[in-house]
Image (spheres, rainbow, N blue to C red):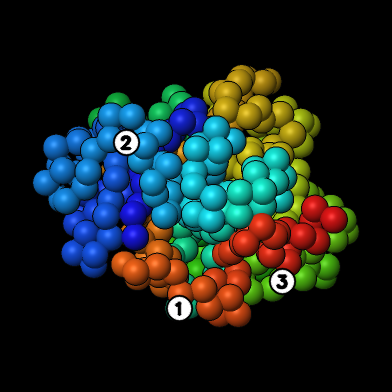
């Protein structure tokens, strides 16, 4: 099997799909790894290190793509990249298939098999392939650092001869993967951390990390497989009442609330932003799916009512070394699950294959994507 690794073309992006270590183990397993020259530079992996690991470096991506069996990327291939790929070949990348119908049409027309990293089921045996979690974990860490950097205060309690500095207060919405890492990071830096989540089972996890759980006394939440599925308007109203006072006291608010398959819920209204202290900071991690804060702007940092609102959509790309290392492990584990050096196994009813395969043999085969696009 011939693999192709491209330099990511999306902006802002600094990650690369395979690292030299992973190239080495795939080469040992009999795969041929082609790398577009410079693909790993932004993550600190230079061409010569890939070459030493067994890769072939291509100064021009066209012949590499035309000859490859599988393209591995972080972000979805562009239409131009798909057009260069061989009919009947395959790719593995983040795709968010229901948002890119135009790419799916090209895949169908060229009989390209598209595997979406974001659609790998969140089941225990697929944990090593779970790139959404590996990247959200790093994103949660970086969100706290960005917030801390923008705040004119320090995090820890400090007693000095000139007086006592009180610790910063951090309020976190959502205690999923990103939120839990944000709690751990903010606690390590010495902040007082408060957290709200609609799933009651997260209370114990929050408290084990030293956070204080703000519990909404209301019914109206449906959960499924560790995700919030449906949150009623009544619940959101009660949550708003509870949160209002805590927001006004917070120095940093980090929002990570996600309801699967839906636009992000608006949890921080313009009025709440207005109630915050001048100089405080909001980091809206859900900005790509519409934002949890009414005033956040996609890929921009804005100041509204004296509050800095950070809407950075690609936090993992700000720690490209670790993000690429973890992504490369996730993607190569999926590849080795699906294929060996001689080709794909095509076990179409197997859970991970079925969950992540979007188009195959000229058809859109992914049930969830079909339903959303219908
Ligand atoms: P996750 O599903 O693990 O966690 C989301 C949490 O939000 C869940 O615990 C859920 O119960 C909670 N939630 C839902 N509705 C809520 C509400 N009304 N109030 C409080 N909590 C609520 O998801 P994740 O992997 O942690 O990702 C979180 C978000 O961060 C997603 O929107 C994801 O797309 C985004 N993300 C952004 C970046 C970035 O660079 N900005 C990077 C990675 C992930």
* Disc nearest the viewer among 2 and 3: 2
Residue beneath disc 2:
36
**Image quarter hosting the C terminus:** bottom right
| Within-10-Å neighbours for mark 1: few <14, some 14–19, many 20+ | few
Q: Is residue 318 visible?
A: no
* Disc nearest the viewer among 1 and 3: 1
* Disc nearer the start of the sequence (1/2): 2
Q: Does mark 3's beta carbon lie closer than 8 Å to ligand 1? A: yes
Q: Secondary structure at mark 3?
A: strand
178 sits to left or right of 298:
left
Instruction: Give the numbered dot on residue 125.
Output: 1
Q: Nearer the viewer, residue 127 or 200?
A: 127
Residue beneath disc 3:
223
x and y, in percent, of residue 148 in the image: 42, 34
| Within-10-Å neighbours for mark 2: few <14, some 14–19, many 20+ | many
Instruction: Give the numbered dot on residue 39.
Output: none
204 sits to left or right of 25:
right
Q: Are marks 1 and 2 in contact (CB under 8 Å)?
A: no
| x 60%, y 80%: residue | 349
x and y, in percent, of residue 326 in the image: 34, 55
| x 40%, y 33%: residue | 62
* Disc nearer the start of the sequence (2/3): 2
Q: Does mark 2's beta carbon lie closer than 8 Å to ligand 1? A: no
Question: Distance from label 1 to label 3 (Cα)?
Answer: 21 Å
Question: Distance from label 2 to label 3 (Cα)?
Answer: 43 Å
| x 32%, y 36%: residue | 36
* Disc nearer the start of the sequence (1/3): 1
């Amino acid at each position: 099997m011939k693999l192709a690794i491209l330099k990511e073309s999306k902006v802002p992006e600094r990650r690369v799909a395979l690292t030299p270590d992973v190239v080495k183990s795939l080469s040992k397993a009999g795969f041929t790894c082609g790398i577009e020259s410079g693909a790993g530079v932004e993550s600190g992996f230079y061409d010569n290190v890939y070459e030493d690991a067994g890769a072939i470096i291509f100064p021009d991506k066209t012949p590499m793509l035309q000859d490859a069996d599988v393209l591995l990327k972080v972000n979805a291939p562009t239409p131009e990249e798909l057009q260069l790929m061989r009919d009947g070949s395959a790719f593995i990348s983040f795709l968010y298939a229901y948002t890119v119908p135009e790419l799916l049409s090209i895949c169908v027309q060229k009989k390209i098999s598209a595997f979406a990293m974001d659609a790998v089921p969140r089941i225990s045996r697929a944990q090593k392939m779970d790139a959404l979690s590996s990247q959200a974990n790093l994103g949660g860490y970086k969100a706290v650092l960005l917030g801390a950097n923008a705040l004119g205060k320090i995090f820890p309690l400090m007693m000095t001869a000139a007086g006592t500095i009180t610790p910063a207060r951090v309020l976190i919405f959502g205690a999923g993967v990103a939120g839990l890492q944000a709690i751990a990071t903010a606690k390590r830096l010495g902040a007082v951390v408060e957290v709200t989540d609609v799933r009651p089972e997260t209370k114990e996890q929050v408290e084990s990390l030293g956070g204080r759980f703000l519990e909404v006394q209301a019914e109206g939440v449906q959960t499924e497989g560790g995700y919030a599925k449906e949150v009623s308007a009544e619940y959101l109203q009660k949550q708003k009442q509870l949160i209002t006072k805590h927001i006004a006291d917070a120095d940093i608010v980090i929002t990570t609330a996600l309801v699967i398959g839906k636009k992000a819920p608006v949890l921080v209204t313009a009025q709440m932003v207005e109630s915050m202290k001048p100089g405080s900071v909001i980091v809206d991690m859900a900005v790509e799916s519409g934002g949890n804060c009414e005033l956040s702007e996609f890929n921009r940092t804005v100041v509204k009512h004296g509050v800095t609102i950070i809407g950075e959509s690609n936090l993992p790309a700000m720690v490209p070394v670790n993000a690429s290392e973890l992504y490369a492990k996730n993607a190569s584990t999926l590849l080795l699950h699906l294929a060996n050096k001689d080709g794909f196994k095509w076990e179409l009813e197997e859970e991970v294959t079925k969950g992540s395969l979007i188009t195959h043999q000229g058809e859109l085969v992914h049930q969830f994507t079909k339903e959303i696009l219908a």
